[in-house]
Amino acid sequence: MVKELLRKLSNAHGVSGSEGSIFAVIKKELKGHVDEIREDAMGNLIAVKKGNKFKVMLAAHMDEIGLMVKYIDEKGFIRFVTLGGWYGPTLAAQRVILHTGKGDIPGVIGGKPPHMMDEDERKKGVKMEDMFIDVGASKRDEAEALGIEIGTPITIDREFCELAGGRVTGKAFDNRAGVAMLIKTLKEVRSPLTIYAVFTVQEEVGLKGARTSAYQLDPDCAIATDVTIPGDHPGIEMRDAPCEMGKGPVVTIVDSSGRGLIASRKMVNWLKAAAEANQVNIQLEVGSGGTTDATAIHLTKGGIPSTTVSIPSRYIHSPCEVLDLHDLEEAVVLLTTALSRKPDL
């Protein structure tokens, strides 16, 4: 079931540059379902299903936004930097896990309590630079004895949970949803094409793994699988993010107002035809916000026709993202149908 796969992936850990834990989960899931699995010099996991000479690259970034130890003070409190796009207030008072060479260490992100704030501080909230991590140590030596050192990666301590109506919440749906989509597609697809499924590293800090792997593989076309922002909840309007959860996967035409990806229309039409052939409801997106691995891929070498298939996900880049499992299941149907024939490029 896609739900249990997503649960496993969401509960796993792997910040940008430290994707080893999630790498191991993906590799285990793919065993026996692909012809080849390898790791490249950047740390990308590349799974191959062999077919004819036409090469399709499917890319899902496996890294999640997180933190990293910057400094341990004399009282054992830990200062950190962020890896990826955090909004400060979402970090305040969160539980975290520090991934050390001696094992995982729990901690809490602390800051000045509201009782001790003046009126101006309460209005502004706690700034990230004023936050710290408390692991229970009373001095630097105690923290270091736990295995904590400069450069230790840190993730949010939050587990997958089911909501009502086929919806679920958890950390790192950006982009464990895209990873789940890609794994399930590889397990189910029957295609005459050669498929390179790349689980990329360091997307959240600059689309780095996608850039190097696309250059190495030089595919004929590419699809990134990721999440996107729906406009179906308070605080955001449909005119700003015109897609909804539960209405099907989203195919990108343009993201980041064209500063990121302007998708190949032939790729978009290929996916639209696949959706029509298998009665999959899809949503089309012209976005003004973020971008995906497809931006780096489509600019590689002489250019690679690309687009993105995304899952509408609420509250992304927070510890409690939300999506509808129906959209994820339909995205798998869309990809497996499209991959049954070559796009007309």
Image (cartoon, helix red, strand yellow):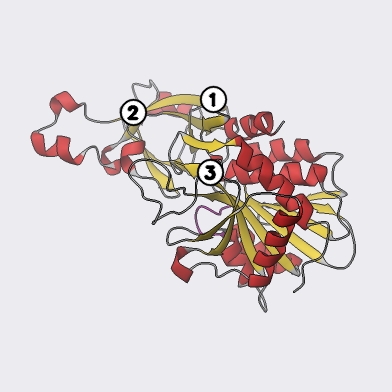
Q: Write down the residue under mark 1.
A: 161
The stretch drawn in magenta includes residue 77: no
How many marks on residues? Answer: 3
Q: Amino acid at mark 2?
A: Ala
User: At x 47% / y 24%, what residue is drawn?
Assistant: 106
Question: Is residue 267 left or right of 14 when viewed as pictured?
Answer: right
User: At x 87% / y 39%, what residue is drawn?
Assistant: 32
The x, y position of residue 205, in whole percent, is 49, 55
Magenta span: 200-207
Q: Secondary structure at mark 3?
A: loop
Q: Mark 3 vs mark 1: which is more N-terminal?
A: 3
Q: Which mark is residue 64?
A: 3
The x, y position of residue 291, in whole percent, is 51, 59
| Figure quadrant of the N terminus | top right
Q: Is residue 120 depicted above or below 343 in this figure?
A: above
- Can the viewer see residue 287? yes
Q: Rounded to the nearest whole Å, what is the CA distance between mark 3 and mark 2?
A: 19 Å
User: At x 50% / y 25%, what residue is drawn?
Assistant: 105
The x, y position of residue 83, in whole percent, is 45, 47
Q: Write down the residue under mark 2.
A: 93
The stretch drawn in magenta includes residue 204: yes
In terms of secondary structure, what is the magenta stretch mainly?
loop
Q: Is residue 195 depicted above or below 104 in this figure?
A: below
The x, y position of residue 109, in whole percent, is 35, 30
